[in-house]
Image (cartoon, grey):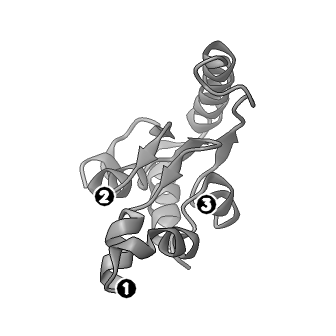
Amino acid sequence: MEMANLKVPVICVVIGEGSSGGALALGVADKIIMLENAVYSILSPEGFASILYKDASKNKEAAEAMKLTAKDLKDFEVIDTIIKEPKSGIEEGFEEVTNKLKKEILKWIKELEKISEEERLQNRYEKYRKIGR
């Protein structure tokens, strides 16, 4: 609730596994950036499978149904940007990934600073309300 009312631009970055209550908090950001191989959901696939299928071992089926990948979430307009990761992996391409991330964050800051505080808060509210439609 507090984060939703921040008067400054809010940009969140999902770099690994964003889940549970933390995922809900990230959802109120003005912009969400996600690494290509990260996952973002309010519930783990095991938890989802336990609830829906009554069987935590169906976590792969649950993960597919949950649409928690960067590509899925970009298609659903939950996130705004996907940062491509090198084929060699993030460990070897750490500098490359952080440079892309820095560039993207600076781009969004410039864009968000052009918008009035009132409009930014309204856009943030509307974006959050749209999730799941």
Furthest-left residue in this view: 2
Callout 3: SS: helix
Where is residue 46? Give x, y as percent: 36, 67
Label 2 Cα neighbours within 10 Å, binned few <14 / some 14-19 / many ≥20: few
> What residue is disc 2 on?
20
The quarter in which the N terminus is drawn is: bottom left
Q: Residue furthest right?
A: 87
Q: Secondary structure at mark 2?
A: loop
Q: Nearer the viewer, residue 36 or 107?
A: 36
Residue at the disc numbered 3: 73
Q: Quadrant of residue 103?
A: top right
Against 29, residue 85 (above or below) is: above
Task: Specify the amino acid type for callout 3.
Answer: Leu
Q: Secondary structure at mark 1?
A: helix
C-alpha span from label 2 to label 1? 17 Å
Closest to the observer: 34 or 46? 46
